[in-house]
Amino acid sequence: MAGGVVWIAALAVLLTGVVALNVAVLRLNVRLDKLNAQRTQLRADKQALASQLSLAAASPRIQALAHRQGLAPADPTQTTYVRLGRGAR
């Protein structure tokens, strides 16, 4: 009779451990899902910022800003290049 009680107690302890382990795994999965959702949101934010940056650096926008400040494109016929010696690169 005493041996049966020991086995029942041991089995109860083992089952409690299994349940505790399952709860811990479930909590980790919930946290992982939240982190994946956050990562997806951050990637979308990054893409939106990259699009804004691309738009801000667009050539027509820069040309319009330069024109408003009184700048004009250089005349290609008056553009020259500086030749450096062979050793300078």
Image: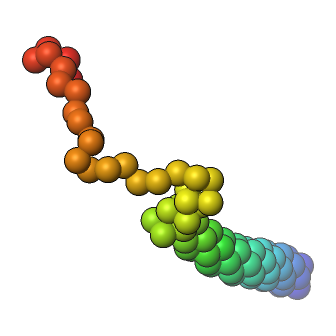
Quadrant where the N terminus is found in the figure: bottom right
Residue 58 placed where, x, y %? Answer: 49, 67
Is 45 above or below relative to 63? below
Asked if residue 12 lies left or right of residue 39, the reply is right
Q: Position of residue 82 (x, y in %)?
A: 23, 27
Identify the residue at image location x=45%, y=65%: 59
Where is residue 31 drawn, in percent x and y? Answer: 75, 75
Give the color scheme: rainbow, by chain, secondary structure or one colour.
rainbow
Note whether 29 is above or below 42 in the view shown. below
Task: Mark yes or no: residue 58 visible.
Answer: no
Is any part of residue 40 visible from this angle?
yes
**In the picture shown, does residue 76 fall above or below 65?**
above
54, 2: nearer the viewer: 54
What residue sits 10% from the left and 17% below the top? 86
Residue at 62 percent across and 53 percent down: it is 69
The residue sitting at 48% across, 69% down in the picture is 60
Q: Nearer the viewer, residue 60 or 54?
A: 60
76 relative position to 38: left or right: left
The quarter of the displayed image where residue 20 is located: bottom right
Q: Residue 78 at x, y = what percent?
A: 27, 42
Asked whether, in this view, residue 88 is left or right of residue 24, the answer is left
Quadrant location of the C terminus in the rendered image: top left
In this figure, what is the number of numbered marks?
0
Choose between 41 and 33: the one closer to the eye: 41
